[in-house]
Amino acid sequence: MPIRSSFDSLPSFSIHPEQFQILHSARSFREQLLDAIRNAKQRIYLTALYLENDEAGQAVLSAVYQAKQQNPNLDIAICVDWHRAQRGLIGADKSQGNAAFYQDYAQQHEHKIPVYGIPVRNREVFGVLHLKGFIIDDTVIYSGASLNNIYLHQQLRYRFDRYHVVTNAALADSMTDFIRQQMIDHPAVYDLSQGNLPTTKEIRSSIKRFRIALSKAAYQVSHQAMEKGHIAITPLLGVGKRNNQLNQTIVQLLASAKQEIYLCTPYFNPPKTVIREVKRAIKRGVKVHIIIGDKTANDFYIPPEQPFKVIGGLPYLYEITLRRFARANESYIRSGDLAIHLWKHDANSYHLKGIWVDRQAMLLTGNNINPRAWSLDLENGLFIQDPEGQLEAQFLAEFDNILTHTQRIKSYKQLESLRHYPVRVKRLLRRVIRTRADRLLKRIL
């Protein structure tokens, strides 16, 4: 029975498969994004956790400004996280962050471009803008990537993500309308490219109202019956624990699986509901593939030869969680019902998310499928229904590309334990585990 029957209540856009494209590398993503910006005729809406003041970030912002100077009528808006934009990198000296970068560009150009800071919560640790999607004219370039050197493979290293391109005016309109009406127009949102910004404390009450409004918001989708030979795409929103449509769809998608599940996440720290559905799926005969980054491919990993910081303990904490899961499910690993694939490629890092079920349904998302994404951050996703398998060849090629640099775990013993870790990491994690602080860290990081 087609998987679509499990999701008939979801309104969706009917899209021809030729309007859907998958890119396979960070460099291809960078080229596609910059080319689309340069050729924009109607609008440019960029949404990401951050737009960094480095070579790649400067290239993106310069391209957007050049497009605006050449065509002042272009509708342009950039949205980034309010908190992340006003601080330096973790462990770096205190600074104005990327907001100074945006203000400098605005002062240099006649036709200015707003860079809106989106304050999802009063403090960054309790929630950030994790919404994804770059909308240029009628095209949505969807990726979990932010905009800086490593995500765009500007230099030697890259952070591997997923990159999907959908050309459909109705979908682009829906996502743009949400950004404009539900985010930019709210009194809690300010243009970071302008000076004299309020402090977070000064707009605390507005942020609280904004959070409440977001919890009730959704993408507006005028349902289109899926035509024969087409796929259906539904944009989904997720914020907070209650009535979170994105979380509910993730759980329902896993519960609907009959043959196979491919699940990608950069940090192995799934919510209990996800672990429960994965185990249930295995028990009913579904083959489950979990694709995750090796601890050395984690974006918080610090090589032993570099100065150690507390944040560098996180990849090891995630590995401990993965090892426990693998040990508890060792029999399924041996039988082949559970396949754990560890991604590692030189000094590069891994940032993939998403779920593919029975080759008929796919969730593209920036959601890390962890407790933080589940209840704190503002997340979204594109849910794809493909009952005729129109996109199967594209997704098979994508996963072949992803699996190129993976090693399949045959036993939990292949994963290092606490006793194998560097001395400073062992000391830190023993203290964290002894005080049960790991439970809190897993919820907020």
Image (cartoon, helix red, strand yellow):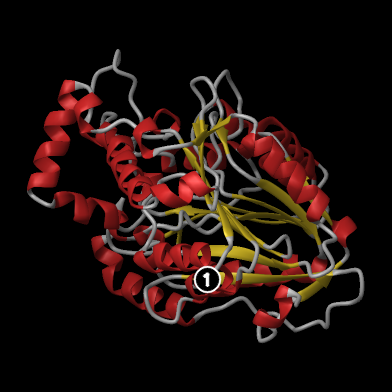
Q: Residues within 10 Å of mark 1 (few under 14, many from 20)?
A: many
Classify residue 372 by image quadrant. Answer: bottom left
Picture coordinates of residue 197, whole percent (x, y): 36, 54
Classify residue 148 by image quadrant. Answer: top right
The residue positioned farthest toward the right in the image shown: 228
Which residue shows up at 26% across the image and 33% down it? Answer: 417
Q: Amino acid at mark 1?
A: Leu
Residue 209, compared with residue 282, is above or below; it is below
Q: Nearer the viewer, residue 316 or 128?
A: 316
Q: Is residue 69 visible?
A: no
Q: Is residue 444 visible?
A: yes
Which residue shows up at 63% across the image and 45% down it? Answer: 162
Image quadrant occupied by the N terminus:
bottom right
Picture coordinates of residue 332, whole percent (x, y): 46, 52
Which residue shows up at 53% across the image and 74% down it? Answer: 182
The residue positioned farthest toward the top in the image shown: 305
Q: Which residue is mark 1?
A: 246
Left or right position of 83 against 279: left
Residue 399, compared with residue 81, is above or below; it is above
Picture coordinates of residue 137, whole percent (x, y): 79, 57
Picture coordinates of residue 174, whole percent (x, y): 69, 72
Q: Nearer the viewer, residue 436 or 139?
A: 436
Disc 1 is placed on an element classified as: helix
Classify residue 175 by image quadrant. Answer: bottom right
Which residue shows up at 77% across the image and 57% down it? Answer: 166
> In this figure, what is the number of numbered marks?
1
